Image: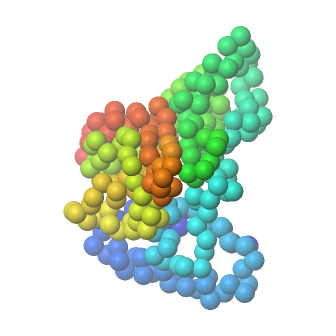
Amino acid sequence: VMLVDEYDKPLISNIFNPEIESMRALLSGFFDVIKASTDCVEFALITGETFSISHLVNNFEDISMYEAFVSLFGFTQKEVERYLSPLTKDSIDDKRDNKASYYETIKGMYGGYKFSPYQEEPLYNPLSISKFFLRGGREFDCYWHDTKIIKPYIPILKKLEGVRYEKLININSIVSFDVLELASSNLCESDYCSFLFQMGYLNIKSYDDDDNKLLTLVCPNKEVKSMDYFLIWLDFLFL
């Protein structure tokens, strides 16, 4: 059994490094060793942005947009109420008369994620919703905007003014997107949207009834929408 977490970190952290192609070659060599040892591997799970995995290895199945597996990538409403809400029972009891409204507010702040065009129930961002309840279930802060998490992407995010809202994109653009294209000066809007979808800043709203390959992407929740304000002060933090 093998688990590789954030396999793409060396690439994402060095998108504008002139040596990135050699880094990808080195990472590809790592996967070549795994591929040659498949007889010894019963199960393998790799996490990370999916837009670069297909360029490194071709004997893994990308399940990130499969309806049967979407619940692996976030918390459902039932899971939040069963496992996280008890951490702040007093907070919820205080709002017992308006419990439904309380959960709707939480959902609007940290929920809304859909990874498959056919997914029925949106999911919660696991990091944000966990921190929200661990800190008492009262502070509706933007927990996902942790600078340690987002810092590698800042040079790219600064280019994305006006690209964070409702957009129509072909699903093939998302699947085939190559992370190294982000360093190009000739990026088109679908490239940016593919990156933002993989990063969680855009999310599937619906698919076209006449062409299910066409997806409408939107900002998933209020926490992500606050990125507008977040980008304003990035320059002051990382001069």
Q: Percent position (x, y) of residue 107?
A: 59, 31
Vertical relation: 133 (above or below) 59: above
Q: Residue furthest left?
A: 185
Vertical relation: 47 (above or below) 164: below
Quadrant of image for the N terminus: bottom right
Left or right of residue 53, residue 154 in this image: left
The answer to which quarter of the image holds residue 35 is bottom right
Q: Percent position (x, y) of residue 62?
A: 58, 67
Vertical relation: 199 (above or below) 122: below
Vertical relation: 77 (above or below) 65: above
Q: Percent position (x, y) of residue 120?
A: 64, 43
Residue at 44 percent across and 40 percent down: it is 219
Q: Residue furthest bottom?
A: 36
The answer to which quarter of the image holds residue 77 is top right
5 or 71, which lies in front?
71
Q: Percent position (x, y) of residue 174?
A: 44, 60
Residue at 21 percent across and 62 percent down: it is 185
The answer to which quarter of the image holds residue 16 is bottom left
Residue at 67 percent across and 50 percent down: it is 71
39 or 130, which lies in front?
39
Q: How many marks?
A: 0
The chosen color scheme is: rainbow
82 or 152, which lies in front?
82
Left or right of residue 115, residue 78 in this image: right
Q: Residue furthest top?
A: 97
Residue at 35 percent across and 68 percent down: it is 180
Is residue 4 in view from this perspective?
no
Left or right of residue 88, residue 19 in this image: left
Is residue 74 in view from this perspective?
yes
